Image (cartoon, helix red, strand yellow):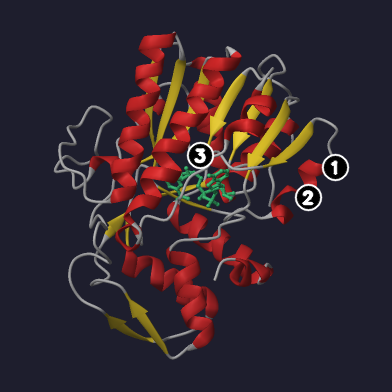
Amino acid sequence: MERSPKAPVMPAMRCFVTGAAGFIGSSLVDRLLAAGHSVVGYDNLSTGQRRFLQGASASPRFELVEADLLGDDLLRSSIAGCDIVFHLAANADVRFGTHHPFRDLEQNTIATYNLLEAMRASGIKRIAFSSTGSVYGESTLFPTPENAPFPVQTSLYGNSKVAAEGLISSYCEGFGFQGFIFRFVSILGERYTHGHVLDFYRKLLADPSRLEVLGNGRQRKSYLYVQDCIDAMLLAIERATGRVNIFNLGQDEYCEVNQSIGWICERLALKPQLAYTGGDRGWVGDNPFIFLDCSRMRALGWTPKKSIQTSVIATLEYLIANPWVMEARP
Ligand SMILES: NC(=O)c1ccc[n+]([C@@H]2O[C@H](COP(=O)([O-])OP(=O)(O)OC[C@H]3O[C@@H](n4cnc5c(N)ncnc54)[C@H](O)[C@@H]3O)[C@@H](O)[C@H]2O)c1
């Protein structure tokens, strides 16, 4: 279910979108095109899907550069002439960080440095960045505001995003950039390719009678629908005027993993036996409780439209209707 095109609220821009073929990036590309902007998408298709860009590719205002942020020849030539950068490319998988300790540093931090340098070389000064609520590590303050302290990192992913945020704010101070840093909770919706809904659905397809649950199922998480996330990003770049603008993006509610399992099983009409692996977290670096204070973004006039439950079901419906996604991301 795509949102209907909206009339442009900003003057038409030439936008550079890294991670354009990804779950959130491709959804953003469609929204930017629908709002009358031009888009240069940049993606190495490591986890992105060309199929997500089928609609965009029909537009004369869209082009895809299939290249890596870690090699900068094409980066510097393709970014030239753009007005703003939306930086979504990353290794977005938090869970397996300790399996390959260099990956988050390389894909999330060094890639961001390369991008900032390419922007600097071309005189582009506005960047919107997809960070994460994982930067707060295990906060003791709930809902967690943007100015909560986060002295201890619990995942290599969160650490790599903190470092990228630091680079962006340093470029804002040092080179007069304007930065928009968005700390997302987990995002749900159409084109979802990784996360708990897909994991549970995949397991239930393999064995409808039993469901393995990482941890004790009592983990409390907040989720946000992808179009609500994009609404916030577009509103913030239009209205926020600071040099470094940091926004939490999430819902004003959270759910237990067990509740989400209940919604998924109800939709699938299944009653599997739940097999908990135990402990209060799913994996090393998993946060047992994520709940962000999003009042700063709400003060700009943003209201998310879909509840967590509706978003979980929309995600599941998408996966049911698009079984190819399960094969594309083994
Ligand atoms: N999905 C979530 O729940 C969530 C939550 C918090 C933050 N984020 C952040 O949002 C962004 C988008 O996440 P997503 O869920 O759409 O992930 P995704 O994996 O679907 O998209 C990432 C895209 O970046 C591309 N990419 C990766 N490395 C690249 C490189 N070196 N050069 C060029 N392209 C590269 C991939 O091919 C892919 O298309 C990421 O930065 C992620 O960390 C996502």
Foreground label between 2 and 3: 2
Between 75 and 244, the one nearer to me in the picture: 75
In what quadrant of the picture does the C terminus appear? bottom right
Mark 2 and mark 3: Cα distance apart in space:
22 Å
Callout 2 crowding tier (Cα within 10 Å): few <14, some 14–19, many ≥20: few
Image spot of residue 157 (x, y percent)? 34, 48
Residue 229's disc is 3
First-in-chain label (3 vs 1)? 1
Assess whether mark 3 and mark 2 are in contact (beta carbons under 8 angstroms): no
Callout 3 crowding tier (Cα within 10 Å): few <14, some 14–19, many ≥20: many
Foreground label between 3 and 1: 1
* Label 3 residue SS: helix
Say left or right for 258 vs 300. left
Which image quadrant is residue 256 in? Answer: bottom left
* Label 2 residue SS: helix
Residue wearing tag 1: 58
Say left or right for 240 vs 162. right
* Label 1 residue SS: loop
Q: Is residue 222 visible?
A: no
Assess whether mark 1 and mark 2 are in contact (beta carbons under 8 angstroms): yes
Query: How many badges with numbers are in the image?
Result: 3
Mark 3 and mark 1: Cα distance apart in space:
24 Å
Q: Is residue 313 visible?
A: yes
Residue 66's place in the image compared with 127, above or below, is: below
* Residue type, numbered disc 2: Gln
* Residue type, numbered disc 1: Ala
Residue wearing tag 2: 54
